[in-house]
Image (cartoon, helix red, strand yellow):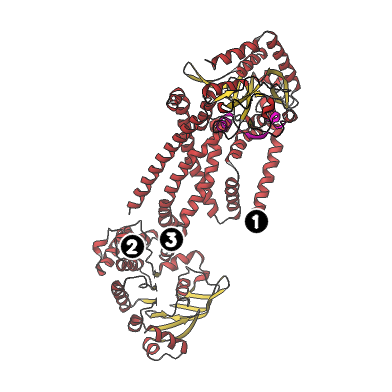
């Protein structure tokens, strides 16, 4: 079958593409989550300036296309600092910065979804706001946040495809290479859709297992 | 012990508490009754400073709580509150629920807190649940544990916000018994409730509120037998 | 809401002022010398390498291929680039990106030259310098084999639906045909899919590319006898606007290679590679 031949002939590009797509998604998630947690803290801050900066950042990132953001990072770093940035690094930075904004929202909504009564009970016992957050609210928020982070990971697998526009050899780029070298229009599309699907499906299932594990805990 | 002076509270444009004035003595048990939306819950939440008054003062043990700043935490440690929906910490065991606050606030050491927990649970006949998680408990058990949790802080006052309203009828009794025992031991209590028989039997004083105002206030017996205000009469005729 | 808008405005202003202010800095920092830009002939010789931008998805001009177990970018344009680097006595560095981003890369100074089978049409000439044409491409018509009998000459193209790649000379040519209905798409595979599903009657594309598609797809054929050579149907090397000295030098090198028959040789070799 034509598809099988394509897979075999171009397996180097597909395998490299899969590795890079997963690596880019994974590390972006880690960095993005850390940054997102920081952004959340700033948003909860009592001081106006950090709060405004964090909010502006989140609004701008969520309001502009990823394609534009990655081009800004890659070309912008050259224009601003004369830095000739490695394409993978540029993609990692752009995707992480993007993910941070969404993670900040995930964290905020995870915290807000904890029942208000928990705050009331905790405060009525005389615990400070910090103690309440640390021992009562955050542990419960994590239960909502973790599965949402898992979903963010799945989303990132697809979002990282913008990296192909600056030359990163991810899965999307692999597909373009196969298309242009083989002159086949449909088959490479079917292949790459199938691979993306397998990746996202597997991850979704893993996230589901994580969710169940967490809810059995109490 | 507790003095509320000209308390007013607005939620945006809604005037939910209108010029409330109350005084509660040490050891008194006061029942707050009235229709839904009368402001009863808001009032006791203000006393615990879980809600902030728009104007007026609240004095707990002579201290104006609105001016207490950081000390509000200390003040809250002396006031225990029990909620309609229990609000137990679902990710902690019964023991942890009870010992968390005493230990974190520095009131007791871990060992002391554990002993206190065991003592309280024994009294309520719930010692066997000490390592269980809240979701394995019935409503009545949860509420009694919630009361134990508040009592572990050895408060001077206990506030009850419709503590039995969310319970199945068969379990109301076991919780009311705990509350009655507390009253008999001399605890100062403010109880927001719909359980009229309980109010009549256990409360020293009953305050009837409607539309954010105190309509009538009297000893339990007097208010139930001889209501003066027509609004009170109307309410009692519907619920008794 | 008002506060949010003003915050965003302040941020946007900050960003634009930083960006415009620091633009010059980059070039100075690379050459370490206030007067020499890194992408000029002098700058290139100073840094010892020439940075070429391309979009390696267009065989036989540039594409990825596995050579001795390693992935490399190869093709006609690559051979030309290597030759240029040799003639200048510097290393060649290839940067790959989306075709649409290449001219942007030139204007930021990140790329020194762009060799990507790019046609120097008037709009592009406004944004960049171009060398002389180094290859004259021919355009042909690709059709579904079922249409063989009704598309035989250029006149037959009028009132047909034609697929072309966005921003190409083929697109311009197609638009000049009377009554033709144009579908402009971003890539050749997209055009081919529309053709195979008969959503369009025909497609105009570069000869080599069209023949390769016909070879790999039994249901497509190249119309014998239609050959479109329009003006400036060739490809040239793009440089940053104003980079005149380097442009002149490259023109010399291209003329030189042409005279030595190198251009024909490279194209034949690249063609061979993809025409087994």
Q: Chain of mark 2?
A: B
Relative to A133, is A15 above or below? above
Q: Residues within 10 Å of mark 2 (few under 14, many from 20)?
A: many
> Which numbered disc covers residue A115?
3
Q: Chain of mark 1?
A: C
Instruction: Choose mark 2 or mark 3, whichever is in front.
Output: 3
User: Is residue C276 at all visible to an observer of this figure?
Assistant: yes
The residue that label 2 is drawn on is: B98
In the figure, is residue C216 to the left or right of B119?
A: right
Q: Residues within 10 Å of mark 1 (few under 14, many from 20)?
A: few
Tell me which corner region of the image, top left, top right, bottom left or bottom right, holds residue C240.
top right
Whole-angstrom CA distance, mark 1 to mark 3, is: 30 Å
Which residue shows up at 35% across the image and 79% down it?
Answer: B195
Q: Position of residue B7 (x, y in %)?
A: 52, 77
Q: Chain of mark 3?
A: A
User: Is residue A169 at all visible to an observer of this figure?
Assistant: no
Q: Residue furthest front?
A: C149
Q: Do callouts 1 and 2 mark residues in contact (Cβ within 8 Å)? A: no
Q: Position of residue A39 (x, y in %)?
A: 53, 48
In the figure, is residue B175 to the left or right of C204?
A: left
Q: Residues within 10 Å of mark 3 (few under 14, many from 20)?
A: few
Whole-angstrom CA distance, mark 2 to mark 3, is: 19 Å
Whole-angstrom CA distance, mark 1 to mark 2, is: 45 Å
* SS class, disc 3: loop
Give the residues drawn in magenta, as a range. Answer: C168-196
């Amino acid at each position: 079958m034509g598809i099988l031949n394509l897979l075999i002939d171009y397996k180097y590009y597909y395998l490299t593409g899969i590795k890079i797509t997963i690596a880019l998604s994974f590390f972006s998630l880690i960095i993005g989550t850390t940054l997102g947690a920081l952004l959340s803290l700033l948003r909860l801050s009592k001081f106006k300036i950090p709060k405004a900066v964090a909010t502006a950042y989140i609004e701008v990132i969520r309001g502009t296309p990823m394609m534009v953001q990655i081009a800004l990072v890659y070309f912008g770093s050259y224009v601003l600092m004369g830095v000739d940035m490695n394409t993978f690094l540029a993609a990692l930075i752009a995707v992480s910065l993007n993910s941070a904004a969404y993670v900040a929202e995930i964290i905020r909504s995870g915290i807000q979804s904890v029942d208000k009564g928990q705050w009331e009970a905790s405060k009525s016992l005389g615990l400070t706001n910090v103690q309440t957050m640390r021992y009562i609210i955050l542990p419960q928020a994590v239960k909502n946040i973790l599965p949402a982070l898992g979903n963010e990971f799945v989303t990132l697998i697809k979002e990282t495809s913008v990296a192909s526009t600056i030359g990163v050899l991810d899965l999307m780029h692999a597909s373009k290479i196969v298309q242009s070298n083989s002159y086949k229009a449909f088959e490479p599309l079917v292949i790459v859709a199938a691979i993306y699907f397998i990746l996202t499906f597997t991850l979704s299932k893993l996230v589901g297992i994580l969710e169940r594990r967490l809810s059995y805990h109490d | 012990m507790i003095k509320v002076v000209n308390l007013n509270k607005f939620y945006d444009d809604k005037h939910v508490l209108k010029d409330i004035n109350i005084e509660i003595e040490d050891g008194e048990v006061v029942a707050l009754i009235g229709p839904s939306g009368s402001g009863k819950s808001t009032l006791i939440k203000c006393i615990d400073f879980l809600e902030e008054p728009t104007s007026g003062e609240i004095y707990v043990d002579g201290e104006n709580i609105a001016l207490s700043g950081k000390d509000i935490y200390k003040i809250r440690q002396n006031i225990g509150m029990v909620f309609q929906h229990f609000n137990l910490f679902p990710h902690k065991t019964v023991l942890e629920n009870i010992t968390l606050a005493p230990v974190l606030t520095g009131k007791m050491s871990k060992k002391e807190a554990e002993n206190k927990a065991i003592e309280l649970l024994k009294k309520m006949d719930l010692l066997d649940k000490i390592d269980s998680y809240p979701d394995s408990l019935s409503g009545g058990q949860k509420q009694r544990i919630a009361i134990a949790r508040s009592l572990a802080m050895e408060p001077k006052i206990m506030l009850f916000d419709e503590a039995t309203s969310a319970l199945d009828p068969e379990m109301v009794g076991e919780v009311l018994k705990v509350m009655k025992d507390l009253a008999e031991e001399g605890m100062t209590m403010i109880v927001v409730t719909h359980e009229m028989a309980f109010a009549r039997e256990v409360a020293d004083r009953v305050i009837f509120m409607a539309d954010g105002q105190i309509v009538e206030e009297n000893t339990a017996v007097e208010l139930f037998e001889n209501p003066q205000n027509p609004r009170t009469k109307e309410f009692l005729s519907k619920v008794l | 809401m008002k506060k949010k808008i003003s915050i965003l405005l302040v941020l946007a202003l900050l960003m634009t002022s930083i960006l415009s202010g620091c633009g010059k800095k980059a070039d100075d920092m690379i050459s370490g010398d206030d007067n020499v830009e890194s992408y000029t002939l002098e700058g290139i010789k100073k840094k010892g390498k020439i940075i070429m931008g391309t979009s390696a998805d267009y065989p036989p001009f540039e594409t990825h291929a596995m050579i001795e177990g390693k992935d490399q970018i190869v093709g006609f344009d690559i051979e030309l680039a290597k030759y240029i680097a040799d003639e200048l006595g510097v290393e060649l560095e290839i940067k790959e990106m989306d075709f649409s981003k290449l001219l942007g890369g030139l204007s930021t100074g990140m790329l020194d030259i762009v060799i990507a089978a790019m046609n120097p049409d008037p709009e592009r000439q406004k944004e960049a310098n171009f060398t002389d044409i180094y290859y004259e491409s021919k355009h042909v018509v690709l059709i579904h084999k079922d249409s063989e009998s009704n598309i035989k000459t250029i006149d037959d193209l009028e009132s047909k639906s034609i697929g072309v790649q966005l921003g190409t000379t083929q697109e311009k040519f197609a638009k000049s045909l009377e009554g033709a209905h144009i579908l402009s798409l971003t890539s050749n595979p997209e055009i081919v899919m529309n053709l195979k599903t008969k959503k369009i009657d025909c497609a105009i594309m570069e000869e080599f590319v069209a023949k390769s598609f016909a070879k790999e797809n039994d249901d497509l054929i190249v119309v014998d006898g239609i050959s479109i050579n329009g003006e400036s149907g060739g490809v040239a090397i793009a440089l940053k606007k104003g980079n005149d000295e380097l442009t002149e030098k490259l023109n010399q090198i291209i003329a030189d290679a042409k005279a030595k028959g190198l251009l024909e040789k490279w194209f034949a070799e690249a063609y061979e590679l993809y025409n087994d």
